[in-house]
Image (cartoon, rainbow, N blue to C red):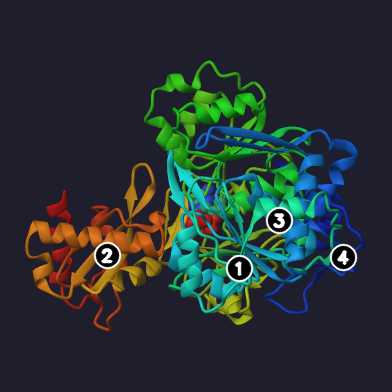
Amino acid sequence: MTGYREYHRRSVEQPQEFWAEKAALIDWHRPFEQVLDASRKPFAAWFRGGLTNLCHNAVDRHLPERAQQAALVWESTEVERSRSYSYAELHREVQRMAAILQRHGVQQGDRVLIYMPMIPEAVFGMLACARIGAIHSVVFGGFAAVSLATRIDDAAPKLILSSDAGSRAGRVVPYKPLLDEAIARAAHKPEKVLMVDRGLHAFEPVAGRDLDHAAESAAVGDSQVPCVWVDSTHPSYILYTSGTTGRPKGVQRDTGGYAVALATSMRDIFCGRPGGTYFCSSDIGWVVGHSYIVYGPLIHGMTTVLYEGTPVRPDAGILWRLAERHRAQVMFSSPTAVRVLKKFDASFMRDRDLSSLERLFLAGEPLDEPTASWISEMLGKPVVDNYWQTETGWPILSIAAGVEALPPKAGSPGVAMPGYRVSVLDELSGEPVPAGHKGVLAIDWPLPPGCMQTVWGDDQRFIDTYWSNFASRQAYSTFDWGVADEQGYVTILGRTDDVINVAGHRLGTREIEESISSHPAVAEVAVVGAADEVKGQQAMAFVVARDASRTADAQAREDLQREIMQTVQTQLGAVARPARVLFVSMLPKTRSGKLLRRSIQALCEQRPTGDLTTLEDPAALDQIRKALADQA
Ligand code: PRX
């Protein structure tokens, strides 16, 4: 194991040398003066003084060699269209989008919120921001008005790029009404809204505010917009993610460190070949889409596939047909997508020529062994688990097959990736626990390049949230339980906080609770994640109604249930809607009034509730039991 061991040892013991070498994988307009600025721990500033640009590294840099190579391939099974853009065409489109942004006053450091379906203009928008030093904040299209409004207020975008509608499983999902409602709710008002009209859902533009993308595009023509060289530490984007509180955190990413980390991961982890095709079926609204649909593959000179559609439409063979059509070398998906496919007849995967495919990467949630071996056997290819977070931007744990193809270990995403000083710590003291013992997975300072710089606009929250969880040690908490073996393989055992993971989508139970509480009939609510065979987890809501008559009979309960689900759907989005809403007349709490979410979760999963000495009233747990039994 010397290859990997030595590689990782060097990355953490001599980070300056290690990352200085890796920095050569990207272009610098001006070399950096310092690899790591350690003057403001726990912050870490990578490649300070260096001038670079993400868009240059993703697009322009490849023009001499790859102008005619496909850069972006768009496939939509929703609107039955596909389109390919060469690097030269991508360069043109991105400049056009950048020219539109500039024409409407967007400058370096300004925020641009992108609320878009999976269409090429979303990618042009991201790259155009990077090109001119504007900071993008992509909001997942599955989020609704309240989620969107919170993010508009936090990021305070000068301009919003959006579209009339997306489409999900053949059904048009209008975006514009949600966007208008979100802007009406938000205290911050964007000056302009740039609308890509797909002709899916008619809308009335707001005079003086809404711009038509097609008209703007025609007006700017084939403009040339040079890349703005920004400091390596200049923020490239903000991406919101859920945590313990109801208020999502804006994960802020830098420019140079991110580019270097992605370039490193493309070679050492994903083993991508420049000129090859990378097909990641995630969404640009999530971190996986940022890193491995847009920036990673393009920085590495690959062709990236942007897929608008589900894994089962028109049939469960679609992902593999696309992989075949585009000769995918690397694929990236989620365990849930594979579990969904598993329910279909295996014939959909046969008779596909997947000879180009080398590996399938899966991430975002725990990968169970049966799912991993099923898909690996079906494909006849290695399946590689990888564990990371919005905060880190690229894998913390995996197998770096580009360095040494260590054998995978069932149930574990793998070993520490370069630069990550991973340890498993006692939850309170912060002392490392021995191999084989459960603790909190933590990362010692410094987080490697590419990881979050801070919480947007709130340095203190970055310190308080991530670096202040252990008494004896200032380490970054992943908020995941883990257990390491003697060889350094870590197994992830779920979150330590109130974050749940539904089909690989990270959701905060507090946000869902706040939304449910806004329903006038709700007195109290607890939301927990309960194990689900396909989606990993599902959200279960236990509600105490203000007025007993609202839950008096089956019809009344059903009506209220529907209203509550609808409330969450219209406020936060369908992605956050609980799978079940059950009624109780009290919730289990400690004597000091703290909700015992873990006990509720245990009951949902038919596990023992553990220590209940602090429980205020045992009858509350009986109510949960009864509610569960009644719905079964
Ligand atoms: O709990 C871990 C789980 O997803 C969380 C991060 O979610 P998100 O910020 O959306 O980033 C996803 C990036 C892939 C983690 O804290 N998680 C992610 N990957 C895995 C995982 N749990 C187990 N195994 C994984 N491979």
Task: Give the Cα separation between the discs numbered 2 and 4.
Answer: 51 Å
* N-terminal label among 4 and 3: 4
Q: Amino acid at mark 2?
A: Ser
Q: Which residue is mark 2?
A: 599
Q: Which residue is mark 4?
A: 50
Q: Which mark is residue 216?
A: 3
Task: Give the Cα separation between the discs numbered 4 and 3.
Answer: 34 Å
Question: Toward the viewer: 371 or 308?
Answer: 308
Label 2 residue near ligand 1, CB within 8 Å: no
Q: Nearer the viewer, mark 4 or mark 3?
A: 3
Task: Say few, some or many: other residues with alpha carbon within 10 Å of mark 2 (under 14 / 14 to 19 / 20 or more).
Answer: many
Quarter of image, res 253: bottom right
Q: Residue at x 71, y 47 (%)?
A: 296
Q: In the displayed image of the protein, which residue is found farthest to the right?
A: 30
Task: Say few, some or many: other residues with alpha carbon within 10 Å of mark 4 (under 14 / 14 to 19 / 20 or more).
Answer: many
* N-terminal label among 2 and 4: 4
Question: Toward the viewer: 195 or 413?
Answer: 195
Q: Nearer the viewer, mark 1 or mark 4?
A: 1
Q: Which residue is mark 1?
A: 209
Task: Say few, some or many: other residues with alpha carbon within 10 Å of mark 1 (under 14 / 14 to 19 / 20 or more).
Answer: few
Q: Amino acid at mark 4?
A: Gly
Task: Say few, some or many: other residues with alpha carbon within 10 Å of mark 3 (under 14 / 14 to 19 / 20 or more).
Answer: some
Q: Percent x, y for residue 406?
A: 64, 38
Q: Are marks 2 and 1 in contact (CB under 8 Å)?
A: no
